[in-house]
Image (cartoon, coloured by chain):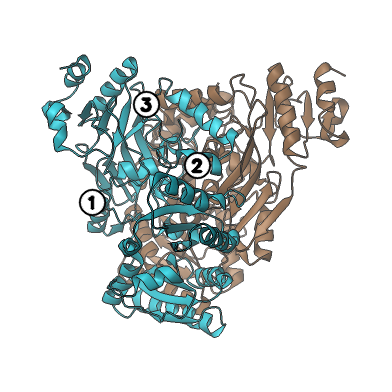
Chain colours: A brown, B cyan
């Protein structure tokens, strides 16, 4: 038993330290680490970090392992810390509309517990069953309903975090307005575990919707997509909750066998939009939704629209949008998560397609995204998955973002995977100030070293 | 002409530097400073800060001077920097729903320019005509519609800021989702000019509402206030835009002569609530609003309700809420801006009233606030305005916040005025991490020294 393991063993209970052969029972995104620690309390997290900080021991925080950018990749000189045993919901305060939870709670559990109290936790994403709120916070997770409710940053009122040196910052604020000095929690949200380990948080809950209206809409011109967004957002008066756009190729792919989805509108158009509104009064909301779409049809803003008539049809519409697995038909593929402002989006996509076509004759390029947020998911297949090809495709996808002020990561983060491209979206001065903050909070660079920047 | 003035003069044009006798033409919240600099470009701001940083010269950033916490108080050893000549709206991008502006633009100008493009900038507060967006950003301003649209933090997509050493951080991001490293802009929002000077910003615009529905509602029990909030928020399905509560005393004050406001509901109840919804379809929205209130009356959640029938009545309702000047009837008074979570609010107010009554027989205590955000404005009169009395009243108002996790500043900030009470809302470790950040970004402590913390 190494000296480090021995010291760690003193800081936690029997189930709190996994090392040696027992590590093989676990899955790690990188090489097997020196040890996996599973603290049960904030104080244990503090003691573990203090020890590691004194020894200059690198620590990789691990959440539900559903991230997509190698943000929890470990190596055999690092220890991994998982808050999987800090998975308690500590309080649901219906009056203040808050939930206080430990970081290891899965997102879906938070959603379900909120619903039991007739409230809603609006953050939602496909990995909800495994992803933890700690991971959601560390990556500032997005999802389908950001256009209405915002990203994880907008759901967090307070946090408790442990700094690299073991200092516990307890800021479990339950109030929406609190302008007393710097809003420290903002530092930790989206920092991918490089500035501290968030152990607990106060989440903001929202009113639970009583109605859900959905439609599939088709348009031919990109400018009509943004026109339609502005019109429908105004007409729905605050209830618009999703505006998911699919480019023609992707829509065809997910509504043609072997995909199970049936096309709600025919394959005749260039852009397909899933629109969702969450409201409070089912019959009046349905009427408003129908009227708003009818007006857009009449005004020629949209070319076609089909409104879901039942919960089954609504679920089927979301299933079409979410059937990302179909891109496997074009395997091997590379998947991207970028954003670009709406005024630049059409030209960005055009340039990307031109560039791909020039470089690879038989490429596939599937595009869909949370368009209301400027967020596109792009899946490119060029028939090869070599590191050289990967790099060439990445450059092809990212290069058009640079002159357009776009982002190489909309909602997935940087991790290791996009580290080389951080400077494509951030200036040297921006990166310098990030590193200044990193150095101030984690001078020995023990927290998730190498993630975001080298 | 001092050496400093001479050096500053080289960095700006003739109108850019005011010193000596000409300073008397201007108003300063504190003592007359050494000079007032009024740069016209970000590069000038950079050169000025670089110079000051090298000389250890303190710099106080000044916005529209509508702050309430002595955040721009200057002394005769400091220079004041005002961005009043950086007051251009640089771009309105209707497709991306963004406005790029310089920091010296008044809030009202932003609102009006957005409206001309059939968009809305939702931040709103009484000082809109003078307050600049730079000041709004630096204090993370709140206001009446935060419950729907959030504070200034939620309206800012990107910023350009100048650090103490003159480094220009340009991060004029126009996209909602951008998870590429730390979200640096969050540091500067609400930092009260102590970490950098924000020169430009990208603001997020929203869909312009087509309908406005308002009512005055009365209830007798505090628990019904929060019950009603949950019910109406759910029933209005996303369109609730204000939930302003007045305690009985304040309501009486602003609806009894000499106040001009007529009471929409009689003076028989304990709590009065101004409810507003902004929607997209006037007739359907009005019906929904009426139905939602009718249901709450029927269910006994609320005791009385009067719905505004015209724009005149809606304006009159807001005028009642905003007639804060009536508290002058009890002058001298001390005004406070605190927040406390809803589950703690009733007991907080009760304890405060008890404490005030024990200390001052003839006190007045008027309370109203943006209750949906946990934000209360409290105006206390005890017949005396001496520094000793001020301190005693402050302690009376703030002491109940400490055990309840409340905040001594909801939306006004800390400045100099609340500096002594920062530790009543923030732990020593939280303040230490704030100071760590301050030291990292402004090692020579030249930016707004003494504000927030000594």
In this rendering, the label closer to the viewer, 3 or 2: 2
Q: Residue at x 52, y 62 (%)?
A: B357
Q: Is residue B213 left or right of residue A196?
A: left
Horizontal and vertical percent position of residue A39: 77, 36
- Please name whichever residue, A41 or B356, is drawn nearer the observer in this view of the structure: B356
SS of the residue at dot 1? helix
Density class for disc 3 (Cα within 10 Å; few <14, some 14-19, many ≥20) is: many
Residue corresponding to mark 2: B421
Image position of B152 with respect to A79: above or below: below
| Relative side of A362 to A448, left or right | left
Helix, strand or loop at label 3? It is: loop
Which badge, 3 or 1, is on the more N-terminal residue? 1
State how far apart marks 1 and 2 are (Cα).
Answer: 35 Å
Q: Could one spot residue A220 in this view of the protein?
A: no
Q: Classify 10 Å Cα crowding around label 1: few (below 14), some (14-19), many (20 and above).
A: some
- Residue A160 percent coordinates (x, y): 63, 41
Q: Give me the C-alpha separation between circle 3 and circle 2.
A: 27 Å
Please report the residue visible at 37 percent of the width from the left and 70 percent of the height from the top.
B253
**Chain letter for mark 2:** B
Q: Which residue is mark 3?
A: B163
Query: Image quadrant for the N terminus of chain A?
Result: top right
């Amino acid at each position: 038993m190494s000296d480090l393991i021995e010291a760690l063993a003193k800081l936690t209970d029997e189930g709190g330290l996994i090392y040696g052969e027992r590590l093989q029972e676990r899955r790690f995104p990188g090489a097997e680490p020196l040890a996996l620690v599973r603290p049960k309390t904030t104080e244990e997290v503090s003691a573990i970090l203090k020890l590691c900080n004194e020894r200059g021991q690198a620590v990789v925080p691990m959440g539900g392992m559903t991230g997509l950018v190698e943000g929890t990749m470990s190596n055999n000189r690092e220890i991994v810390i998982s808050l999987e045993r800090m998975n308690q919901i500590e309080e649901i305060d219906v009056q203040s509309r808050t939930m206080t939870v430990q970081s290891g709670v899965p997102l879906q559990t938070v959603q379900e517990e909120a619903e039991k109290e007739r409230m809603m936790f609006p953050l939602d994403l496909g990995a909800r069953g495994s992803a933890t709120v700690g991971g959601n916070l560390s990556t500032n997770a997005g999802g389908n309903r950001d256009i209405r409710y915002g990203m994880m940053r907008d759901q967090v009122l307070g946090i408790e975090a442990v700094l690299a040196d073991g200092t516990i910052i307890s800021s479990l604020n339950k109030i929406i307005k609190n302008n007393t000095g710097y809003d420290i929690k903002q530092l930790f949200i989206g920092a991918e575990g490089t500035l501290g380990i968030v152990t607990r948080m106060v989440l903001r809950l929202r009113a639970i919707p009583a109605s859900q209206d959905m439609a599939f809409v088709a348009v031919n011109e990109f400018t009509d997509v943004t026109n339609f967004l502005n019109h429908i957002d105004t007409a729905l008066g605050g209830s618009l909750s999703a505006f998911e756009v699919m480019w023609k190729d992707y829509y065809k792919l997910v509504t043609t066998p072997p995909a199970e989805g049936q096309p709600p509108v025919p394959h005749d158009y260039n852009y397909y939009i899933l629109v969702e509104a969450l409201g409070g009064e089912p019959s009046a909301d349905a009427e408003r939704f129908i009227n708003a779409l009818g007006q857009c049809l009449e005004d020629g803003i949209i070319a076609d629209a089909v409104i879901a008539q039942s919960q089954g049809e609504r679920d089927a519409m979301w299933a079409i949008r979410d059937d990302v697995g179909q891109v496997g038909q074009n395997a091997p593929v590379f998947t991207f998560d970028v954003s670009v402002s709406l005024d630049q989006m059409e030209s960005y996509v055009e340039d990307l397609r031109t560039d791909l076509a020039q470089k690879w004759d038989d490429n596939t390029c599937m595009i869909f995204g949370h368009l209301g947020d400027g967020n596109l998911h792009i899946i490119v297949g060029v028939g090869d998955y070599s590191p050289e090809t990967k790099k060439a495709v990445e450059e092809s996808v990212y290069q058009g973002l640079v002159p357009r002020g776009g982002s190489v990561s909309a909602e997935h983060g940087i991790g290791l995977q996009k580290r080389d491209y951080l400077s494509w979206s951030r200036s040297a001065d921006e990166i310098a100030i990030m590193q200044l903050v990193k150095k101030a909070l984690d001078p020995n660079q023990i927290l998730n070293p190498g993630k975001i920047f080298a």
